[in-house]
Image (cartoon, rainbow, N blue to C red):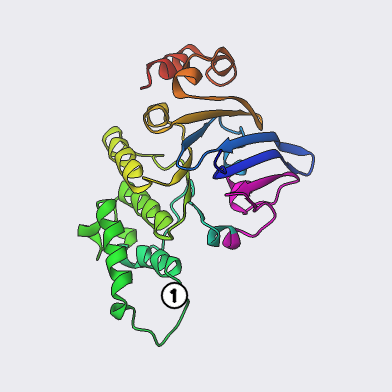
Amino acid sequence: MSTPALEIAGLHKKFGPAHIIRGVDLTIAKGERHAIIGPNGAGKSTLFNLISGYFQPSEGSVTMNGAPISGLPAFEINRRGLSRSFQVSNIFANMTVRENVRCGVLHSMGYGYSFWRNIGNLRSVQEKTAEILEKVELLDKAHVPAALLPYADQRTLEIAVTIAGGADVILLDEPTAGMSHSETDRAVALIRKATEGKTLLIVEHDMGVVFDLADTISVLVYGEIIASGKPEDIRGNPKVREAYLGDEADQQAIGGAA
């Protein structure tokens, strides 16, 4: 059996008396597309912050590719091959689209800060940057300041920056939030293409996105995983319907998602 991309064991997070994550156990295989769903306040973003090093666990462990990463700072976890996006766009607004992506590429190719180096002469960096921009369909907007992009393109740019670092494990936190139906369809296709061959862990409220994209779905409710399995198993799980999709409208939503 191959080593999992991520293995989470007995993970807890407390903020004072508030117990947000309550003993999460989760194993994510290499190359798997795994979605975390759950109601607002379930602890999904907290779980992401624990995995990526922005929060330190109160108890338990996170292992990536067989090596423990819990307790390490976020930048060190990133260097070991994990990258993440955030619910709110986290890009350099005053830099162009190309410059945003190029920052991630420079890091992934081992170029530290050097004020005397002419970036324009680094052909490999320029080629890799263009390759990523083409993959996410932003090459024609490479010269545009990020702040001037439409909202959906800003979210796409953040995905591009997330994958630019060359990480093998990608965490996307609600990448389609605020998008129209057509924008969401385009984003899903781009995520699928941009993360091909990588391990993807995604938090998403749009059930259409979840069932279209994920190989495996885990349901987080009040800091605990109450169900985990293939999309068709989660769709019919009575515990999920009761705890997460309790009202009739939501049950119809998960039942009709494909």
The residue pinned by badge 1 equals 111
Of all residues, the one furthest to the left in this rendering is 140
In which quarter of the view is residue 224 placed? top right
Q: Quadrant of the C terminus?
A: top left
Q: Residues within 10 Å of mark 1 (few under 14, many from 20)?
A: some
Q: Is residue 108 above or below residue 182?
A: below
Q: Quadrant of the N terminus?
A: top right
Q: Which residues are magenta?
A: 48-76
Q: Is residue 69 above or below residue 179?
A: below
Magenta stretch: includes residue 112: no
Of all residues, the one furthest to the front in this rendering is 1
Of all residues, the one furthest to the bottom in this rendering is 116
Instruction: Tell me which residue sits at (71%, 47%) in the image.
Output: 57
Residue 243 % position (x, y): 60, 19
Can residue 140 be seen here? The reply is yes
**Element marked by disc 1:** loop
Instruction: Tell me which residue sits at (52%, 39%) in the image.
Output: 29
Magenta stretch: includes residue 72: yes
Q: Nearer the viewer, residue 229 or 245?
A: 229
Residue 145 % position (x, y): 30, 64
Of all residues, the one furthest to the right in this rendering is 17
Kind of residue at disc 1: Tyr
In which quarter of the view is residue 219 placed? top right
Side of 56 relative to 164 (left or right): right
Can residue 96 be seen here? The reply is no
Residue 48 % position (x, y): 57, 44
